[in-house]
Image (spheres, grey):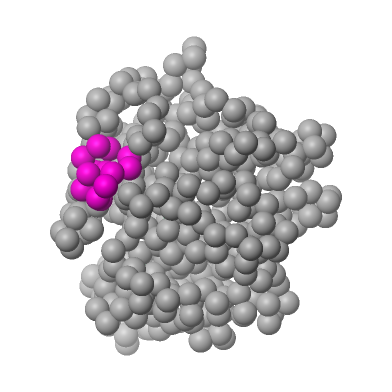
Amino acid sequence: MKLLVIGSGGREHAIAWRLAQSPRVQKVFVAPGNGGTALEPGLENLKLDSIEDLADFALKEQVHLTVVGPEAPLAAGVVDLFHSRGLRIFGPNRACARLESSKEFAKAFMQRHGIPTAAFACFTEPQAAHAYVDARGAPIVIKADGLAAGKGVVVAANLQEAHDAIDRMLVGHLMGDAGNRVVIEDCLEGEEASFIVMCDGEHVLTLATSQDHKRLLDGDRGPNTGGMGAYSPAPVVTPKVHARVVREVIQPVMAGMAAEGHRYCGFLYAGLMIDRTGAPRVLEFNCRLGDPEAQPILMRLKSDLYDLMEHAVECGLDAVEAVWDRRAALGVVLAAAGYPESPRKGDPIEGLPAPVEDVRVFHAGSTLANGKPVTSGGRVLCVTALGDSVKMARDRAYHVVDAIHFEGMQCRRDIGHRAIEAR
Ligand code: AMP
Ligand code: GLY
C-alpha cells in the first residue's frame, strides 16, 4: 500500500523511513521532502504545496493513509479537508490543533480543565501588557499567541527585556500576525521534558520520553531555535512522573476535548517543566511529533509504525503496545551558518556515512543539486545514534558528526549533558 507524509524536516524523514519498513507498505510519498528523503529507499518526493493538491493526489493514487508532520497544515485544516473527501489521515483536525496554533486558546483550555500550567494573562494593548509586567515582576515570559516556528517566546530575565519583547510584538509587529496578541506568563523553574503520545479520540498510547535542547549554543546559551538536539529516554521522567503526566495532563486534554465536542486524534506533544518534587506543568502543547525529538524516538521504536497509526485512525489504540529498544538514542542537529536568523544555503554537504543499523543521518534543510546533497535551510541534518547509554549514543553520534562537513556548519557539543550528568 501507499502512504503519504506531509513535511520536509528531519522529523518527516524519520517518520517516512520508519513507515517504509513496514512489510505492508510499498511506497511512502513525502511532500515536499528533502535531499535525504530523495535518496532513501522506498521513499519518493512530491512537489505539491497546497493541501487541495495533496488531497487530489491522495485520491488519485489511492493513498492508504496520510501522516502530517508539521503544525502549519494542521492549523490550515488539512485533516478536515481529507476527511471531507473520505481520505484517511493521521493528525488532529483544525479545532483540536488550536492547542498549538493559539497559545491563548491552549492556556484558557488548561484553565477550564484544571491542567497544571503557569499563571498567565493575554493582551493586545501594549499599555496593559506593560502594566501587567510591572506589577508581576521579572523573570517573566512573553509569548506570541500564534505559530512562530519556535521563535515566538522570550524568557525575560529583567523588566527591560520584557518591555522590549512586548514592544517588538505588539508595537513593532516583528512577529507578524502571530504576535498581535501576546500571552504573558510566570517563569517556571525545573527541568524540561517532551512527553509525546498518540491519540485515537478515546485512547492514548504513550511514546518514549525525550528531551530537546532549544538554545543555539552549548550550556543553553544563545537564542531559542526549533531544537538543536534531543535524546530518549529522559531520566527526569521517572515512572512516578510519567504516571502523573498521564493523569494530570494527557487524560484531561482528551476528556476536555471530548467535553467540548472534539475527538483528539493524532500526536499530542506536551512540553513540560518538571519541578524538584516531580510535579509537571505544561509549557506548551504541540499537535505533532517534536523535531528533533522524533528522530531519537523513532530510532528506538521497534513496533511497526504503520500498524500503530492504522490502529489510531480506527480508534483501536487500546489494542496495541509500542515496543522500544532498551538502548538510548541521541540526535545532534547540524545547522547552517547564520541559523536561526538567516541561514545560508547552497553549500555542498560532504562526509555523509553509509546508513548502518545504529546510526542514521536524517536530513532536513537539504536538497539535491546534480544528485549531490547541498544545504537549503536552517537545520540541515540530525545525526542520530543508538547506544547502551546516553553517553554511548552521544559518543557514537559525535563520531559521525565529526566526519561531516559543510561551510559554516554549527552544532552543539553538549547534547545529552543533563542525562549524562544525572548518572
Ligand atoms: P514554548 O515554545 O512555549 O515551549 O517555549 C519555548 C521555550 O521557552 C521552552 O522550551 C522553555 O525553555 C521556555 N519557556 C516557555 N515558557 C516558559 C515558562 N513559563 N517558564 C520558563 N521557561 C519557559
Ligand atoms: N523540538 C521542539 C518542537 O518540535 O516543537
Residue 379: image location, x then y, percent: 39, 39
Q: Quadrant of the rendered structure where residue 263 is?
A: bottom right
Quadrant (top left/top right/bottom left/bottom right) for the N terminus: top right
Query: Which residue corresponds to the image point at 26% horizontal and 73% vertical from the top-left?
Result: 190
Q: Which of 307 and 15 lies nearest the eye of the viewer?
A: 307
Residue 393: image location, x then y, percent: 27, 44
Residue 260: image location, x then y, percent: 69, 80
Q: Which of 303 and 40 lies nearest the eye of the viewer?
A: 303
Query: Which residue corresponds to the image point at 73% horizontal and 77% vertical from the top-left?
Result: 261
In the rendered image, residue 394 lying in the magenta stretch gets the answer yes
Horizontal side of residue 360 vs 20, given as left or right: left
Report the magenta stretch's main SS.
helix
Q: Which of 267 and 158 lies nearest the eye of the viewer?
A: 267
Q: Is residue 153 above or below residue 121?
A: above
Query: Which residue corresponds to the image point at 39% horizontal and 33% vertical from the top-left?
Result: 357
- In the rendered image, the residue lying farthest to the top is 370
Query: Which residue corresponds to the image point at 52% horizontal and 26% vertical from the top-left?
Result: 40
Count of labels in the image? 0
Q: Is residue 26 above or below residue 81?
A: above
Horizontal side of residue 191 vs 99, given as left or right: left
Q: Is residue 212 above or below residue 112?
A: above
Quadrant (top left/top right/bottom left/bottom right) for the C terminus: bottom left
Q: Is any atom of residue 96 visible in this view?
A: no
Which region shows up in magenta? Answer: 385-397
In the rendered image, residue 304 lying in the magenta stretch gets the answer no
Q: Which of 200 and 288 lies nearest the eye of the viewer?
A: 200
Q: Is any atom of residue 395 visible in this view?
A: yes
Residue 107: image location, x then y, percent: 50, 77
